[in-house]
Image (cartoon, rainbow, N blue to C red):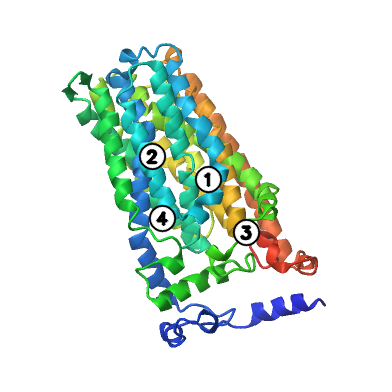
Amino acid sequence: MNTSVLKRTFNQKEKAEPLTHSTAVDSGNDSKGAYVDNQAVEPALNRRITRSFDFHIIPWLFGIWLLAFIDRSNIGNARIVGLAQDLHLDGTKFNITLTVFYVPYILIDVPSNWVVKYLGANYYLPGLLIAWGVVGMCTGFVKDYGGLLACRFFLGLCEGGLLGGMIIYLAMFYRRHELLFRIGMFYCAAPLSGAFGGLLATGLAQIRHNGYNRWPWIFIVEGVTTIAYGLITIWFLPATPSHARFLTDAEKEAAVHRMGLDAHGASKESKVESERFSWHWVRMAVLNVNTIVLSLNFFAIITPIYSFSLFLPSIISNLGYSSVKAQLLTVPPNMAGFFAVILSTFLSDKIKARGPIMLGGCSIAIIGYIMLLIKTTPLVHYGGTFLVAAGVFPSSPAVMGWLANNLAPHYVRATGTGLQIAVANCAAFIATFTYLEKDKPAYTTGHSINIGMLVLSLALSTTHILYVKWENRKREKGGRDHRLGEGDEGMLGYKHPSFRYTT
């Protein structure tokens, strides 16, 4: 038998000795002497490290994503308080304005993920925030359709690298089956932005000053807020676990070591900052079943998410409510989405599975869209928006976390995640045209398109669960052990026989 196979088999059978707080302290700053390769981190120390990351990282990312979604979706609120009339957005001009945002957004995803680690996520993510805050503020001063198109283009350029960058950033700190709940803890800001943004827009739209009446103040005030938050955030985010100033030396050592253990042979570097870019990792990311299937799955999920976020005020307004009341009525459905994201991501990490969450979320959302389609009372239609929000919003972090779990090491994950988000955001070209003026008030075409996309997601999720289970069984039976003798073991990444996919 190949010696590397014997070594792997021995290491899997050997019982790990916990790395305790005292063990790490005794080793001082000598990282090589702090632990042996397969030594587990003491559970209490693990929990302390995770809580520290939760406290010092997640709140800042939550704020970033909240502002990102508010600044992206506030155009929907502005539309019904004078934007469409003042800038003469007749026909499909409003839909084209929404579409322009996603052209640079899609193109920047993958290269942006490549530079996150190089530039330092602690500077890069707040830098993006400040940049799109400036663009968002400038949107309040536009006077015509062309100026609005330009602002939306540059807003997409600035926001494009954010989501992938945040997921890659979290994957540097959290183990694979801790990751989704943390993604959920910042992603729940998306539906909350719909709730908070509606209330904020209602208040800001009452301002009339110096020739700028109602809708401009939505962009101006929210843009200035984003800039201020970015300037504050840049001082608090750590670059990597080993650069976290809020951890002791012993905790830093354990934080780095536990990530190496969680890689299960997929990475030969214990510190993420030690990994180097290679086109080999790019090819592995692109030519991967997980990347292909889960990118298409995210494409299917993004269509109802974007159309819901952008058009919910219009959908509710066409149920017979005034613009002010429609703004306020967007709050409860979005709050349902907020709580659904937190609950589902917590459950997903507990069961260490993503596919079942996808299946449940899509099924709930389909029921919601059916309620919107049937001829009944406005109250039943409005109730359908709750189920749509509770179904589609949890599906987004689930599908992103699913791919992030199944790709390794860093640059494979960075490339695959960027590609997934780029492919998914192509759905924006569909989503921005699902609800047209000529289809109101029933919007039958838009609701039907979203049901079709959710059915596609159900089919892709089911197929992928079956594939992942098949591949994991093959690895457990030694069907991939031959890879250990075919070259450099450190270049196997997710192909390593010890690495297991998440279902």
356 and 202: which is toward the camera: 202
Along the polypeptide, which appears first: circle 1 or circle 4? 1
Where disc 2 sits, the SS reads helix
Q: Which residue is mark 1?
A: 112
The residues tagged by marks 1 and 4 sit, at their Cα atoms, a distance apart of: 14 Å
Q: Which residue is mark 3?
A: 501
Q: Which residue is mark 4?
A: 122
Give above or below for 450 relative to 354: above
The residues tagged by marks 3 and 2 sit, at their Cα atoms, a distance apart of: 37 Å
Give above or below for 43 relative to 343: below
The residues tagged by marks 3 and 4 sit, at their Cα atoms, a distance apart of: 29 Å
Disc 4 marks which amino acid?
Asn
Give the image location of residue 431, x and y in percent. Answer: 49, 27
Q: Which residue is mark 2?
A: 131
| Mark 1 neighbour density, 10 Å: few (under 14) some (14–19) many (20 or more) | some
Foreground: disc 3 or disc 4: 4
Q: Quadrant of the C terminus?
A: bottom right
Disc 1 marks which amino acid?
Ser
